[in-house]
Image (cartoon, rainbow, N blue to C red):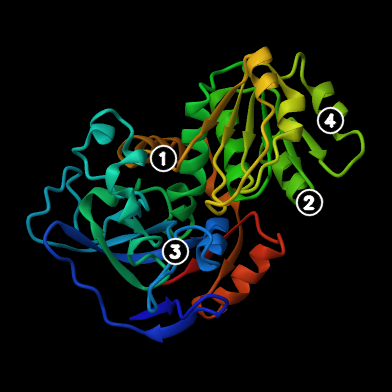
Amino acid sequence: MKGAVYKGYGLPLEIEEVPNPAPKEGEVLVKVASTGICHSDLHLLSGELVGPLPNGFIIGHEIAGWVEKIGENVKNPYGLKEGDPVLVSWIVPCGICRYCANGKENYCKDNAKRLVGLIGINGGHAEYLTVPEIAVIPLAKNLDPYYSSPIACAYGTAYNALKSANATSGKSVVIVGAGGVGSAAIQLANSIGLNPIVAVDIDENKLKSAKLLGATHIINANENDARAKVLEALEDGADIVYETKPYPDFKLSLEVVKSGGTIVVTGLGGFSTLAQIPVTLFVSRGITLIGSLGYRPRIDLPDLVSLASSGKIDIKKLVSHIYTPDRINEAYENLKKGLHIRAIIRWN
């Protein structure tokens, strides 16, 4: 099979013929339809995120496809069959630790040693991959796997972040960053009933897209009066500020969040990333700061499949660029340039 193989820091991925994977006991072989081009991959490839990658590793953690083969002793709680459309979660919970038992699969103790396309398990930038069955979630038959991969990262990350911030109908939200995750958050905010939904970015094209996706207000952060414009859109500051950027400085967030409001952060830069936080301001205004990692595969992904299947979110609208595997390095270069909302690689 063909795969995009990691060759070292600073080197392009190489499309090579690699051995076809076979499912071991408890695993599922997935034929990959599409894999998303996620900003976290840039930090992974630079060594900022998880440290050195082994040569020959295959990245790609936002994956949709079809069941190709089911390994032995798979419990198969969803009754999956060969040919069924599925999502692949990059988070692979053990299912039994205290975090998994308490609905916090995204903080499973196994995360340190196995994350699809990130640590220990080859990812989806290939024609096939094998993963533990717990990472395979059924996709509704009316959803196209070629467009559905963003559910498995962009939408999942945004959904869990908004849930963590206790987003409920009638609350206001400011979304800082209108890339893939921020744009998914705009659609999800609409499905929840948040209002107003204020999108902030420095890219006019992304802001125009944000408006089409349902933002009630779009504001360019480079404008001198950006803070005033955000506050003008809000009655008394934002109930929720969602920081999607990997290197937030919190300046704007702290200026526009209301007293008693919540700032939620999901961007994954490097572990050396630091931000200065005015502690007294947080205390005196009762501001809550939440870090939110990914999503809960067995809880959030089925919810999102239901939302997409019922038309409450439109996953096709998020995909701005589609690439063939031979253009994968071009896709990542264009991501660096900020040209995408969400891009995908089509593999089969």
User: Sequence order check: which comes first, mark 3 or mark 4?
Assistant: 3
Image position, residue 106 (x, y; %): 36, 40
Mark 4 closeness class: few <14, some 14–19, many ≥20 residues within 10 Å: some
Circle 3 packing at 10 Å, graded few (<14), some (14-19), many (20+), is many
Q: Position of residue 127 (x, y in %)?
A: 36, 73
The label on residue 60 is 3
Residue found at x 31% / y 60%: 66
Whether residues under marks 3 and 4 lie with C-beta atoms below 8 angstroms apart, the answer is no
Q: Quadrant of residue 184?
A: top right
Q: Closer to the camera, 80 or 176?
A: 176
7 sits left or right of 287 in the view: left
Disc 1 secondary structure class: loop
CA separation in Å, label 3 and label 2? 25 Å
Q: Which residue is mark 4?
A: 227
Residue carrying label 2: 203
- Of the two numbered discs 4 and 2 on the same chain, state the one appearing first in sequence: 2
Q: Identify the image quadrant of residue 175.
A: top right
- First along the sequence among labels 3 and 1: 3
Left-right relation of 99 to 185: left
